[in-house]
């Protein structure tokens, strides 16, 4: 009897979250810098180490032919972590990198550094060092402030061993307030450390019209967007 062909084992999968919208409802992944929308830019900058890619959300947004071949599956963008769990189920990699299509200036080098950090621990991500202090206030009174060198903001990508990501998402259903947390916060809340990869000033994600104005200005100055 002829032996069955062995299925190729996938080492690294990517999930691109394309669900974000501006306050007026405009899908962020469809915003255009030059001839590309932001989802195009994110797919184009995926490093070669990634063997399969799932796009979460932005179902009505088409990709260029060359880029569409890099996307193996698309999952409907329902709200919350349940949709992310569905995207995880649609992939097969032992390592999973989570990207954000709202990031206007993705860099394949960030993903490669996260993959390197994942050799040492089961979760790692890109974080940008603080540029200003954070204040804690009650009503109209500031109670305390944190020095800028003591906090970091999350960027993209965030990487996991598949086992850990599956565990975190499964636990979310039983964690109060989980859907109001980011995946990074939820992972830390459940007691898992995350390896730190230092990010870039231009590694921000677009959340409002002011971020979009900044992205357009940086795109007009290629060196500033590095």
Image (cartoon, helix red, strand yellow):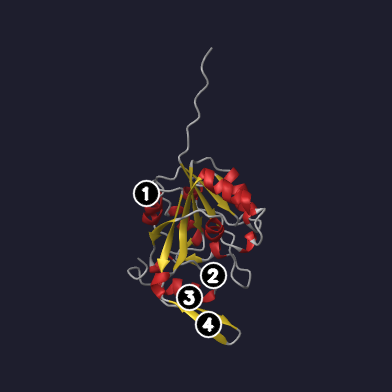
* 209, above or below 61, in the image: below
Q: Pick the residue in front: 128 or 213.
A: 128
In the visual, does 116 lie left or right of 188?
left
- On the image, the x and y values in percent for residue 23 come to 61, 72
| Mark closer to the chain start, 4 or 2 | 4
Mark 1: which secondary structure? helix
Q: Residues within 10 Å of mark 3 (few under 14, many from 20)?
A: few
Q: Are marks 3 and 1 in contact (CB under 8 Å)?
A: no
Disc ID at residue 102? none
Residue ID for mark 2: 207
Image point (47%, 34%), residue name: 9
The residue pinned by badge 4 equals: 143
CA separation, marks 4 and 1?
40 Å
Q: Cβ–Cβ below 8 Å for labels 4 and 3?
A: no
- Is label 2 or label 1 in front? 1
Q: What residue lies at 57% left-to-right and 51% top-to-bottom? A: 168
First along the sequence among labels 3 and 1: 1
- In the picture of the structure, the residue carrying the numbered disc 1 is 116
Mark 4 or 1: in front is 4
Distance of label 3 from label 1 (alpha carbons): 33 Å
Q: List the residue tagged with mark 3.
A: 213
């Amino acid at each position: 009897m002829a032996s069955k062909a062995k299925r190729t084992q996938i080492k690294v999968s990517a999930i691109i979250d394309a669900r974000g919208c501006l306050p007026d409802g405009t899908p962020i992944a469809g915003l255009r810098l030059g001839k590309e929308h932001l989802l195009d830019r994110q797919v184009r900058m995926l490093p070669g180490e990634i063997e399969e890619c799932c796009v979460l959300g932005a179902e009505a947004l088409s990709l260029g032919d060359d880029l569409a071949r890099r996307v193996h599956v698309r999952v409907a963008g329902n709200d919350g972590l349940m949709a992310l769990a569905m995207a995880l189920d649609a992939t097969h990699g032992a390592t999973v990198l989570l990207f954000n299509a709202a990031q206007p200036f993705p860099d394949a080098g960030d993903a490669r550094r996260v993959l390197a950090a994942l050799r040492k621990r089961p979760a790692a991500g890109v974080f940008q060092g603080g540029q200003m202090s954070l204040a804690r206030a009650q009503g109209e009174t500031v109670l305390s402030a944190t020095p800028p060198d003591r906090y970091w903001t999350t960027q993209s990508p965030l990487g996991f061993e598949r086992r850990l990501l599956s565990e975190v998402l499964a636990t979310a259903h039983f964690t109060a307030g989980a859907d109001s947390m980011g995946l990074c916060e939820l992972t830390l809340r459940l007691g898992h450390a995350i390896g730190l990869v230092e990010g870039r000033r231009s590694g921000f994600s677009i959340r409002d019209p002011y971020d979009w104005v900044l992205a357009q200005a940086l795109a007009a100055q290629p060196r500033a967007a590095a």
